[in-house]
Image (spheres, grey):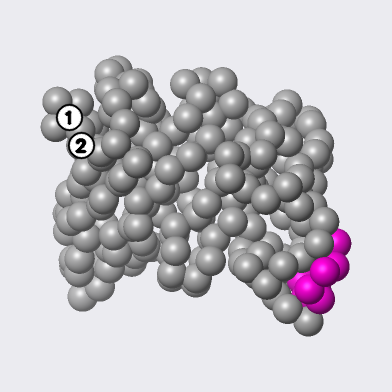
Amino acid sequence: EVQLVESGGGLVQPGGSLRLSCAASGFIFRSYWMSWVRQAPGKGLEWVAKIKQDGSERSYVDSVRGRFTISRDNPKNSLYLQLNSLTAEDTAVYYCARVMGSGWYDHFDSWGQGTLVSVSS
Amino acid sequence: DIQMTQSPSSLSASIGDRVTITCRASQSVSRFLNWYQQKPGKPPKLLIYDASTLQNGVPSRFSGSGSGTDFTLTISSLQPEDLATYYCQQSYSSLTWTFGQGTRVEAK
């Protein structure tokens, strides 16, 4: 069974940093693109970032590019999201998601339960 | 960036009703269009990918259609467990992916 478990969320001051982790199990982690999706309280879903199987390709939504960094450690079956220069607009539940498709009809077929990031003074 | 617009933003329907949700892309996304269902406090669940392919385990009352810029999610006979928010998402762009703003389906 595919399992994705996020951790690392919490309360942080504006301008602060946080590192989110996603522990993957139940599948061959190194074979899949992975992604982060967030959802602000009471709002819709927003795709944040994605990373290729070997980490050689990454892309970001415009609103986080230059502030967030997605990375992965395949031997540890782990996905990460480094969040820097946080603002109140980054307050959201952050979901880790597996990408099925490898560039052809990509879709998110498995999701974690999410970790909440709150940015407030 | 490709913008995705869903309509309506919310709808009220009776159990057993046929429900249709529309998603429009700001430019062609071919068939690179997915649909998700989300219930309060839960992560999204994949329903349909490739515009019309039903994910394993999803009831056959759900169906998707469309290509290019206009897509539809249909629930043929609304069930109580279908009350949720539905999102479309494009994966056509190789760089950035986008979701629609969501459609909330409520009971009448």
At which x and y percent is residue B89?
60, 43
Q: Is residue B27 visible?
A: no
Q: Which residue is mark 2?
A: A78
Q: Tell me which residue sits at (25%, 73%) in the image.
A: A120
| Mark 2 neighbour density, 10 Å: few (under 14) some (14–19) many (20 or more) | many
Chain to which the residue tagged by mark 2 belongs: A
Query: Label 2 to label 1, Cα distance in Å?
Result: 5 Å
Q: Residue at x 24, y 45 (%)?
A: A22
Under circle 1, the secondary element is: strand
Magenta residues span B11-19
- Compared to residue B64, the image places residue B76 above or below, namely below
A83 vs A92: above or below: above
**Quarter of image, res B63:** top right
Q: Relative to B82, is A112 on the left or the right?
A: left
Q: Quadrant of residue A121?
A: bottom left
Marks 2/1 in contact by CB < 8 Å: the verdict is yes
Q: The N terminus of chain A is located in which quarter?
A: top left
Q: Which residue is mark 1?
A: A73
Considering depth in this image, is A104 or B63 the residue closer to the camera?
B63
Q: Amino acid at mark 2?
A: Ser
